[in-house]
Image (cartoon, coloured by chain):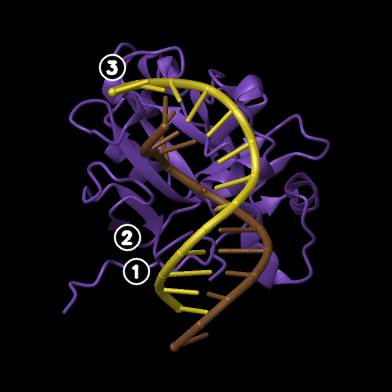
Chain colours: A purple, B yellow, C brown
Amino acid sequence: MTSSKPSALIRPLDQAFFARNPRPVARGLLGKVLVRQDAPTPLTARIVEVEAYLGANDPAAHSAAGNTPRNSVLFGPPGHAYVYFIYGNHYCLNVSCEPEGRAGGVLFRALEPLSGVEEMARARGIEIHSDKDLPKLTSGPGRLAAAFCITRARDNGIDLTSSAGSLWIGDDGYRSRGISITPRIGITKAAEYPLRYFLTGNRFVSGPKTLPRVDK
DNA sequence: ATATCGATTATCT
DNA sequence: GATAATCGATATG
């Protein structure tokens, strides 16, 4: 299901939006737009899947062990980019939440491309032959980071609330309809917490697209 | 459709 | 030395 229409005007989210618990921030980010302003052609994509990582009482969060050089952005002002490198291969993008001094973040897991598809395909090193191939661009945290040319050196710590910046998050008026909530993907600690949020039925969502079945 | 595995490095024990 | 908020390739049902 292709849910989105590109819209001409996109207003950046303000810092107050992010100065909250990561759970409402995660829910609220669904349907918003990630913008890469300074690419050869501007890149925009709708946020369709995210995960919340809590500052306190969340063993799976990078902030669980306290403030370190790697994760210090999570303890800084809200609305800033926390970018980390994982498995020797991939960058992942988060946005810091909670007021400054308290940790918390939201991981971007999947996007639905709205503009700049050619540029994203080039950045990913793949070719798009049909609509069937589009999810390969931005379905998955490593993929979307590659599509937007997000690296730690370039983007860690930047302010995502300024439309004058290179990378920011905006609202184009889109209203999401259904939201699904499941456990987070790829973690071993606190694996059961229901902190993954995605737009129900959206084909760009990565991983399981339904609520887990109460098996047997 | 699910399962397994290698790649490759920052961070922590 | 082990692990990790992953991906892509390969194998098999």
Label 1 crowd (10 A; few <14 / some 14-19 / many >=20): few
Mark 2 falls on what kind of element?
strand
Answer with the quarter of the image where residue C13 lies: bottom left
For label 3, count other residues whose C-alpha is less than 10 Å away and answer few (under 14), some (14-19) or many (20+).
many
Q: Is residue A112 visible?
A: no
> Alpha-carbon distance for marks 1 and 3?
32 Å
In percent of width and height, residue A129 lies at 79, 69
Give the camera-side residue of A79 and A138.
Answer: A138
Alpha-carbon span between mark 2 and mark 1? 8 Å
Q: Is residue B8 above or below residue A143?
A: above
Local secondary structure at mark 3: loop
Residues marked 1 and 3, same chain: yes
* Proximity of marks 2 and 1: CB atoms separated by less than 8 Å: yes
Q: At which x and y percent is residue A131?
A: 69, 70
Query: At which x and y percent is residue A109?
Result: 48, 48
Closer to the camera in the image, A165 or A203: A203
Q: How far is the residue under mark 2 from the one under mark 3?
A: 27 Å
Chain of the residue displaying label 2: A
Residue occupying image coordinates x 39% and y 13%: A68
In this rendering, the answer to whether A130 lies above or below A65 is: below
| Amino acid at pointer 1 | Thr
Mark 1 highlights which residue? A210
- In the rendered image, is residue A67 in sight? yes
Instruction: Please name the amino acid that badge 2 sits on.
Output: Ser
Question: Which residue position holds label 2?
Answer: A180
